[in-house]
Image (cartoon, rainbow, N blue to C red):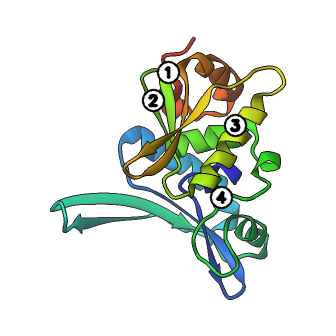
Amino acid sequence: MIGLLLGDGHIQSRNGNGRFIYAQSSLRENHLNYFYHVFNMFKPFLSKDFKAKSRSFLDKRTNNTYSSIRFATLTLPCFNYYKNLFYNSDSQKKIVPSNINNLLTPRGLAYWIMDDGSLQNKGLHLSTYAFSYEEVVLLKNTLINLFLPNFILKCTIHNHKKGYRLYIWEESMVLVKKVISQYMHKDMLYKIKGTT
């Protein structure tokens, strides 16, 4: 849940409880396979015979048609814990929990990378555009601490036109792959390829 909520997952409040919503806008086969992997993990929290919903929409700015697929769980009290972590009480805007350093695990990092990671010059970008600079600093420190005391992860913040993003340097990717590859869906391993 932590990795998914740092990535493409959301919690929506309804009638005092929360529901988990997950969507993918890339419908390439490997992304669809990963989407259904996540979908199947949440089947116990879906209504009986629930089917993922796909839709197409026209972006009037570019005149391009895009497709997406999504699912939403039932509204349940078990999601309130995550809602309280990732959302301000007076806002629907997702935030980075102040205790993320205690929450992020190697498995969570794998899911975060599968959602928002992209290879760049044999290193890896993590899209953190929705978060403030202070939150991205917190995420950077959390990543570094995840590998201490055995290894100092080389990770920097890049200022992109969309916002701030994290970059894990090439020399750190061998360790990242070693730590998270067991949790990566086979169709998403391309996001950490190029390391031995």
Q: Pick whichever of labels 2 and 4 is earlier in the sequence.
A: 4
Q: Residue at x 42, y 59 (%)?
A: 69
Task: Name the residue at the top extreme.
Answer: 196
Label 1 near label 2: C-beta < 8 Å? yes
Q: In the rendered image, which residue does mark 1 sit on?
A: 193
Q: Is residue 56 left or right of residue 5?
A: left
Where is the C terminus found, in terms of image quarters?
A: top right
Percent x, y of residue 22 = 54, 60
- Identify residue type, mark 2: Leu
What's the distance in space between the residues labelled 2 and 1, CA to CA?
8 Å
**What residue do we see at 57% from left, 46% from top?**
37
Q: Disc 2 marks which residue?
A: 119
Between 110 and 103, the one lying in front of the other is 103
Q: How crowded is mark 2: few (under 14 residues within 10 Å), some or many (20 or more)?
A: some
Task: Point out residue 165 in the picture as x, y percentages from the top left corner.
Answer: 50, 44
- Decide if residue 159 is on the left or right side of residue 172: left
- Disc on the earlier residue, 3 or 4: 4
**Which residue position holds label 4?**
42
Disc number for residue 113: none
- Report which residue position mark 3 lands on: 143
Mark 1 to mark 4 CA distance (whole Å):
28 Å
Q: Which of marks 3 and 2 is in front?
A: 3
Across and down, in percent, residue 84 comes to: 75, 71
- Report, in whole angstroms, how far the alpha carbon at label 1 lies from the one at label 3: 19 Å
Q: Is mark 2 on a helix, strand or loop?
A: strand
Q: Which of marks 3 and 4 is in front?
A: 3
Label 3 packing within 10 angstroms: few (<14), some (14-19), many (20+):
many
